[in-house]
Amino acid sequence: MDLLVKLYALPGGPSQLAETENFEIRRAFAAEKTLLAHWVEQHFGRGWASEAETAFARLPIACFVATAQSELVGFACYDATARGFFGPIGVAEAYRRCGVGRALLLRTLRDMAGQGYGYAIIGGAGTTEFYRREAGAAEIPDSAPGFYRGMLKE
């Protein structure tokens, strides 16, 4: 099922991004493309790695990273699958349930809003409750399999 997020009605403000001394969220650097793609492939598979690489073709780069002590612990992209789509997003297992995913989600969605988008589509969302709770996402009726219909798989 696809979800829709109203970017003009995101909860909280920039101060609620939950960044702490434990991790930092920032836009990825172009020089990190290969390193990020390799990390994403190792943790989440080739498909997501391909999408993450596509986000580097956008200007500004449409990929954010979470780092802890200069180590990559998560990422989030947009405009990778299709224009206006958020995702993929992934967090290393050791950093889940620490606010990293929420911070990546909100930072990336706020950037989409700053780029002029009114809405974001989260395609084929696996954890719909997370997106509802953190970003006010709503299901798009009759959207499965949606955009991904006919996609090649390993």
Image: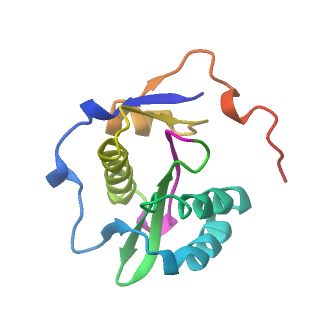
The percent coordinates of residue 149 (x first, y second) are 76, 31
Residue 45 lies within the magenta run: no
Name the residue furthest front: 59
Q: Quadrant of residue 82?
A: top right
The percent coordinates of residue 54 (x first, y second) are 61, 59
Q: Quadrant of residue 40?
A: bottom right
Q: Magenta residues, as a range?
A: 83-95
Above/below status of 3 relative to 74: above
Which of the two residues, 135 or 86, is positioned nearer the viewer here? 86
Which of the two residues, 30 or 65, is positioned nearer the viewer here? 30
Name the residue furthest top: 141
Quadrant location, the C terminus: bottom right
Quadrant location, the N terminus: top right
Q: Residue shown at 34%/84% (left/top)?
A: 69
Q: Residue shown at 50%/66% (left/top)?
A: 92
Above/below status of 128 relative to 143: below
Residue 88 lies within the magenta run: yes
The percent coordinates of residue 47 (x first, y second) are 71, 56
The percent coordinates of residue 23 (x first, y second) are 31, 71
Above/below status of 63 relative to 39: above
- Report how many numbered discs are placed on residues in the image: 0
Above/below status of 99 relative to 147: below
Q: Residue shown at 51%/78% (left/top)?
A: 32
Q: Is residue 77 left or right of residue 113?
A: right
Q: Residue shown at 47%/62% (left/top)?
A: 75
